[in-house]
Image (cartoon, coloured by chain):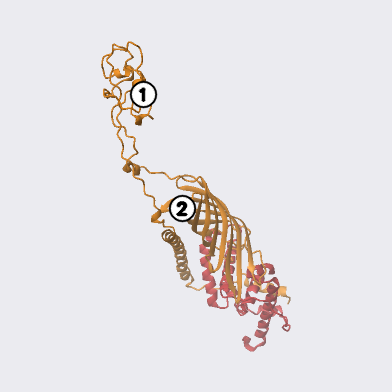
Amino acid sequence: MTICMRYAGDQKEAEDILQESFITIFTNIGQFRSEGSFEGWLKRIVVTTALKILQRKKVHISAINDNDETIPSISPGVLDKLSEEELLELISRLPEGYRIVFNLYVMEGYDHNEIAGMLNINPGTSRSQLAKARKLLQQQINVRFKLPNGYVR
Amino acid sequence: MSDKNFDNYFRDRLRDHSSPVPADMWQRIIPEQRRRRKFFFWIWIFAGAILVMTGLFVNHHILTPDPKTTLVPRSTPEPKTVTLHLPAAHTGKSDSSGTVPSSTPASTTPPSSVTKMTPSVPTSSIPTHHASLSQTRFSSLSQPRAYRTYHASLAPYPISRRPVAARSLPLAPQSPAKQKSKKQKPVLPKWYFDAYFSPDIALIDLREWSYTTGVRFSKQLGPHFSAKIGLQFSSLREKAKLDSEALHIRLTTLDIPLLAGYQTSVGHLATTFTGGIILNIRSWNTLGPGFITHDFYKANTGLSLYLGLNFVQPLNKKFSLFAEPFIRCRLWDISKYPNFFDNRMNAAGILLGLRYKH
């Protein structure tokens, strides 16, 4: 469910991804080869299902001009104050293109060439999307801790 | 904090984190799985029905034979009865001059003294030329063969020592009733060669047209069965949409079809059910426009299942035209990452071609 929530924009979309993933797993359970771990196989199916659903939504991923101002870096101590649910929420608030590339690169461990092949984009586009995702996350974290009472605008 | 540390922090915090699953998730999964199985079952039933209906339509409207050209059998002549006549029995006295009476030409009518022979004469009891022979039913055979006359219509038949009964010899062709009872086996060609072109569609996307072209060699293995092998080239296209941009996917393949055929008849028409596998030799794919062509699909897409229904319209003794609606389904996904995109690019079409029979 955590993987679904990382790719989805909200709880309902996460549940749709989880439902589709389980159906795919039960349908293709006979194709599992014991070469790798079962958990890894399940994880791949959930990730691919999430990408399929997002493709149906016609997510547009295009190159961006990164001319934004520099964002002050965050100290590790600040991140420790955030719970896992809050981190998931920060990721879900990202635009869909940034969120997909961030998850595939940071969480799944794919490189930019592999991401470009999966999403039919340029590797350069993948890099720029990832850089933008990091900056937005840092912005959100800074805003969260600058506002009184921890509320996010 | 560097980018790498930032990434590592998110990964380490969220890698083993588990979120609660909705309580009704299981109830939502099972009915959906059953619904999908039924859907694919009816897809196959629908495809088979389309195939049969196409065949019946082609047979009824296009390939029905013209009644004016139907052959009418000639009337058979009445069987003629021919009686075999042989010269009369000799009295037993030989000719003192020792001369042999001249032979009577076969075209002349037999003498009035000709008697009819009975069939029950064993060969060993044929008497020799001797005066002591009494006038028996065998004595006519004592005369030299030159005396024996026979009717002109019996000329083709060999003369044997065994007397032939004076009975009707049916020489005429069999009656129509007997002719009909005999089944005339059609003369089947030993082999035949097909060249064809087919407009195709990808079953997942009906908007783009595709095509297949190829040649096929068939060997007849009996009255009904045949084996086929060929070489064909296919270009299958699909259109996908990513946001506002159109993504054109083209899959080009070079294949070897290995098929078997069972010939039967539907109405007046010879029909062949064709089925088998198609072995892919090589595949190429392109994605465009505006996207980098990426090595996303396999270079060999493996085996496909093939099912078709062949209808033939002869032009002359050697050449025929044929139409064969078909459906082709790949056994495996064509992408290198099957868990991401389940895409087999199955296709349907109708082969239209020329056949040469040997």
The crowding category of the residue bearing disc 1, from other C-alpha atoms within 10 Å (few below 14, some 14 to 19, many at least 20), is few
Left or right: A130 in relation to B54: right
Extreme residue toward the bottom, this view:
A148
> Residue A8 placed where, x, y %?
57, 75
Rendered colour, chain B: orange
Q: Is residue B295 visible?
A: yes
Left or right: A138 in relation to B148: right
- Depth check: B243 or A152 in front? B243
- Depth check: A142 or B253 in front? B253
> Residue B249 placed where, x, y %?
60, 67
Label 2 residue SS:
strand
- Depth check: A117 or A147 in front? A117
- Depth check: B165 or B339 in front? B165
Q: CA distance from mark 2 to mark 1?
A: 53 Å
Q: What letter labels the chain drawn in red?
A: A
Residue B160: image tag: 1
Disc 2 sits on a residue from what chain? B
> Residue A138 placed where, x, y %?
68, 80
Within the image, what quadrant is residue A112 found in?
Answer: bottom right
Q: Please, is residue B134 above or below residue A133 in the view?
A: above
Which residue is pictured at 27% across the width and 19% down the height?
A: B137
